[in-house]
Image: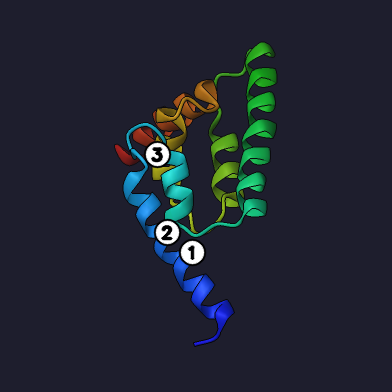
Amino acid sequence: MGALEERIAKLEYYQSLLMEMIDETKKPFYHLVIQANLTKEEVDEVIELCEHLSKEYEKQKEEGLTIFTPLLLHFAGMLNPNLPLEKTVDALLKQQMFVPLMTEFQKLIKEIKHL
């Protein structure tokens, strides 16, 4: 095995150890990101998507809208395919990220599941 392959193998081993150290209950979104093997760019895209939808959610609420299913559908359609929708929403909420939006999404998902 070459030096580069040995370094990669060592980094992968360290990553697996770090995964054991991360408290999934405190940083569930980051845990999910590592499990999904996302790149920094892919994570940035998720964060940008959430920021955009959070602004849109607040705007729609101010306009008096009460149905936010289109925002959830947009989120689901644009979410990285390696991130499961419900787990991602729950993880972001538990990690206190985009709380108003994720709370709404969590409520909508529960309503859809009970139909």
Residue 57 shown left or right of residue 10 in the figure = right
For the residues bearing labels 1 and 2, Cβ distance under 8 angstroms: yes
Q: Which residue is mark 1?
A: 11
Mark in front: 3 vs 2: 2
The three-letter amino acid code for the residue at tag 3 is Pro
Q: Nearer the viewer, residue 3 or 69?
A: 3
Q: Which residue is mark 2?
A: 14
For the residues bearing labels 3 and 2, Cβ distance under 8 angstroms: no
Position above or below: 76 against 23: below
What is the distance, in whole Å, between disc 3 and disc 1 at their CAs?
Answer: 22 Å
Residue at 58%, 78% (x, y): give it: 4
Mark 2 neighbour density, 10 Å: few (under 14) some (14–19) many (20 or more): few
What is the distance, in whole Å, between disc 3 and disc 2 at their CAs?
Answer: 19 Å
The three-letter amino acid code for the residue at tag 1 is Leu
Position above or below: 15 against 108: below
Q: Nearer the viewer, residue 73 or 34?
A: 34
Mark 1 neighbour density, 10 Å: few (under 14) some (14–19) many (20 or more): few
Mark 3 neighbour density, 10 Å: few (under 14) some (14–19) many (20 or more): many
Q: Secondary structure at mark 2?
A: helix
Q: Quadrant of residue 49?
A: top right
Image x and y of residue 27, in percent = 41, 36
Q: Quadrant of residue 75?
A: top right
Residue at 50%, 60% (x, y): give it: 37
Image x and y of residue 88, in percent = 45, 43
Q: Single out the residue that lies furthest toward the front.
A: 3
Q: Quadrant of the C terminus?
A: top left
The three-letter amino acid code for the residue at tag 2 is Tyr
Q: Nearer the viewer, residue 51 or 37?
A: 37
Q: Secondary structure at mark 3?
A: helix
Q: Which residue is mark 3?
A: 28
Residue at 62%, 16% (x, y): give it: 61
What is the distance, in whole Å, between disc 1 and disc 2 at their CAs?
Answer: 5 Å
